[in-house]
Every structure is written in structure tokens, then in C-alpha cells.
Image (spheres, rainbow, N blue to C red):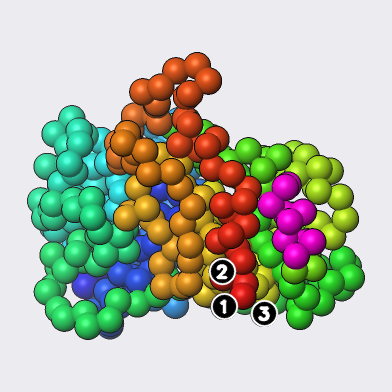
């Protein structure tokens, strides 16, 4: 059997498919399971996963349409038995791609919003979205369209590190004169910016204040994680905090090898929040307008800090950008109303436990 996973969204969604991937390989141990990725970091994540046979990368966002069509047709000639659109893939482009690849069984979701407009019916095996379930659970429901089976305990997410990642992490600790036994607290103050999700970001000055509080109460050393587009953000937080703060600029997998030594991780709803959960790090997750049911930290200790406003959560999976019903100073107040003492209290609970 040949199965193609269309993992065309970001790192967090790719990581939240790994429990389903593990179960898929368990149910079809002889299957060739390939992955199509659109981001290099997703390619890197899956290339290390032993449940994956091949990873194909194509930057559909930047490549011209002719090049992208050629890539899809090349995959069509591989004659896949099944293709799976990783949840949430509520975009017509992904569904068209699935149809053009031409697997006999094309798995996807029926979404609660904009379903017909996004041509989900191009997938001939579908499961109805349930907005009370986690993304991990949605993906497991999806693969059961190929074969129903019992899952008494759902698996954790999986990250596979190479010895080179561990070596890079060891060198980083030596360079920064840090011990892995120190009270290391990881921060991720960034988010993706597509679809206006920069509005998820808690204020950098509040991250800085939280860091100072953790330094004072626990002697914590703060590690600031994020990609190249977040280095400037991390520099500003580091300047506001002062001493015992370190910016991690390693690639994503060596960065994960550093991250796994943290005693606590504090993040917006972001991919690195899920990396922390996959590494079993107790996590404080700061949520604005997104739904914690979908994406709370999976299979680790966690605390969610959010404002339960009548209008939230208001974001649902669709191509539409995040917007707010409030205007002026009240815009996205679900985010700015969260205060550092609320985050500190959540951090204290996890650190003391």
C-alpha cells in the first residue's frame, strides 16, 4: 500500500499529526508512507521520523504555478492508494491538489465553516469536524477512514533528534556557560504571521516582566526561542529583561535538543508550544482568540491562561484572516487583558509541582 500525507500547513499542525502517523504505521506496517511538505522545517521534522518512507518538498507559496503543477503531476505518476489531508486543511488549493494526485482514497474533513466553498468534496472519504476535539484526535479519526481500529490510549506527539542535534545543543550550552541542571525556562513570544495571526502575540513587555518575576522568585534563566523573523522580537525582550536571558538561534531540530532541558515553557498558541508538549515540558499556554479545545498542549502538564469573553474563541479553520468584532482600544482585548501576574501564577503552580 502507498499512502501520501499532504502536510502543507505549518510545524505545529505537522507535529500534531505524528500520533496518527504512528498509529497508521502500526496498522499498515508494510505500507510506504510518504509526506509532501511546503515548509523546510516541516520537511526536517518528518525526514527524521522512522514511520515515513520519503519526504517531498515544494514551496507552493513561492514557486510559480507551472512548477507547482509539475510537482503534483509527478506525484500522480506514483499511483498512491490513499492520500490524507492533514487536519486542519480547509483550503481549496489543498483539496484540488489531492484530487490531481489522484489516489483512489482521498481522506479529508467536512468542515463546519466554508466547507463547500473550499471544495472539500473533492476528497471521497470524509469525517465531520468536531470542534470539541483536539487536532490530534481529529487526525486519528481521519486515518480510521482507511481502517477502523481500537485506540485505548492515544499516543503522544513525537520528535526524533539526531546525535548531531544533541551535539549542537551541548556546544550551545558550553558557549553560553549554562548548565542543563539550571532552572531553565523557555519563552516563545512569537507566532506565525499568516492570516493576521500576529495578533495572537502577547505583548513583549509582558513577557519581559514575566521573565523578571521568574528570575527573582526561582533564579530562572530565560531562553528565548523563535525563528529568524523573531530574532528582533527576542532582542527587544532580552534588552527589557537584563541578565540571565539567552536567545536561541539554532535551527529547529537542534533548537528542540536545547529546549528539552527546560523545566518550563511559556508560549503563545504557536508551533513551539507544541514542540514543548512533545518534549514533555510543563507548559504555560497563553491563548487569545483561538480555541484551546483544538490545540492545547498534548500529553504534558499544562496551564492555559486566557480571558473567557463572550465572543471568544472566535477563530475557526478557514482561509480567512483573524479579525475582531471590537474596534479601537478594545480590538483583540482577549489578548491584551491578560496580565503578567496571571502567567506567573500558572508558572508557579507548574514549577512547584
Identify the disc placed on residue 163: 3
Q: Nearer the viewer, residue 332 or 224?
A: 332
Mark 1 lies on a secondary structure that is loop
Q: Quadrant of residue 281?
A: bottom right
Is residue 275 in view? no
* Spot occupied by residue 274 in the image (x, y as percentages of width and height): 49, 61
Drawn side of residue 85 relative to residue 206, left or right: left
Q: Is residue 332 above or below residue 326?
A: below
Where is mark 2, residue-wise? 349
For the point 48% across and 23% down, the residue is 330
Q: Nearer the viewer, residue 243 or 58?
A: 243
Q: Is residue 196 above or below residue 214?
A: above
In the picture as drawn, the residue positioned furthest to the top comes out as 328
3D distance between C-alphas at marks 3 and 2: 34 Å
Magenta part of the chain: 208-217
Q: Is residue 180 above or below residue 293?
A: below
Whether tag 1 and tag 2 are in contact, CB under 8 A, the answer is: yes
The 10 Å Cα crowd at callout 2, few under 14, some 14 to 19, many 20 or more, is few
Q: Quadrant of the N terminus?
A: bottom left
3D distance between C-alphas at marks 1 and 2: 6 Å
Where is mark 1, residue-wise? 353
The 10 Å Cα crowd at callout 3, few under 14, some 14 to 19, many 20 or more, is few
Give the main secondary structure of the magenta stretch.
helix
Amino acid at each position: 500500500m502507498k499512502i501520501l500525507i499532504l502536510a502543507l500547513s505549518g510545524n505545529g499542525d505537522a507535529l500534531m499529526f505524528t500520533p496518527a502517523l504512528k498509529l497508521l504505521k502500526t496498522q499498515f506496517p508494510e505500507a510506504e508512507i510518504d509526506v509532501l511538505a511546503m515548509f523546510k522545517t516541516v520537511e526536517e521534522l518528518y525526514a527524521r521520523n522512522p514511520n515515513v518512507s520519503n519526504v517531498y518538498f515544494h514551496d507552493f507559496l513561492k514557486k510559480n504555478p507551472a512548477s507547482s503543477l509539475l510537482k503534483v503531476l509527478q506525484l500522480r505518476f506514483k499511483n498512491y492508494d490513499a492520500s490524507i489531508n492533514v487536519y486542519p486543511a480547509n483550503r481549496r488549493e489543498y483539496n484540488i491538489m489531492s484530487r490531481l494526485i489522484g489516489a483512489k482514497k482521498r481522506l479529508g474533513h467536512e468542515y463546519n465553516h466554508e466547507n463547500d466553498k473550499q471544495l472539500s468534496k473533492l476528497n471521497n472519504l470524509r469525517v465531520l469536524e468536531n470542534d470539541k476535539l483536539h487536532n490530534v484526535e481529529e487526525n486519528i479519526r481521519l486515518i480510521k477512514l482507511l481502517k477502523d481500529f481500537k485506540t485505548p490510549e492515544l499516543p503522544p506527539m513525537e520528535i526524533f533528534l539526531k546525535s548531531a542535534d544533541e551535539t549542537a545543543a551541548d556546544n550551545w550550552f558550553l558557549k553560553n556557560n549554562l548548565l542543563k541542571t539550571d532552572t531553565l525556562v523557555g519563552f516563545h513570544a512569537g507566532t506565525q504571521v499568516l492570516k493576521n495571526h500576529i495578533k495572537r502575540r502577547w505583548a513583549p513587555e509582558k513577557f519581559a516582566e514575566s521573565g523578571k518575576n521568574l528570575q527573582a522568585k526561582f533564579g530562572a534563566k530565560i531562553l528565548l526561542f523563535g525563528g529568524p523573523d523573531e530574532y528582533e522580537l527576542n532582542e527587544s525582550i532580552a534588552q527589557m529583561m537584563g541578565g540571565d536571558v539567552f536567545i536561541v538561534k539554532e535551527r529547529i531540530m537542534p533548537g528542540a535538543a536545547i529546549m528539552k532541558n527546560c523545566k518550563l515553557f511559556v508560549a503563545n498558541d504557536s508551533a513551539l508550544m507544541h514542540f514543548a508538549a512533545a518534549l514533555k515540558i510543563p507548559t504555560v499556554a497563553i491563548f487569545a482568540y483561538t480555541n484551546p479545545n483544538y490545540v492545547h498542549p498534548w500529553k504534558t502538564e499544562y496551564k492555559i491562561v486566557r480571558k473567557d469573553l463572550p465572543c471568544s474563541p472566535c477563530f475557526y479553520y478557514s482561509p480567512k484572516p483573524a479579525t475582531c468584532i471590537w474596534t479601537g482600544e478594545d480590538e483583540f482585548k482577549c489578548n491584551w487583558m491578560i496580565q503578567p501576574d496571571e502567567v506567573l501564577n500558572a508558572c508557579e503552580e507548574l514549577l512547584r509541582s
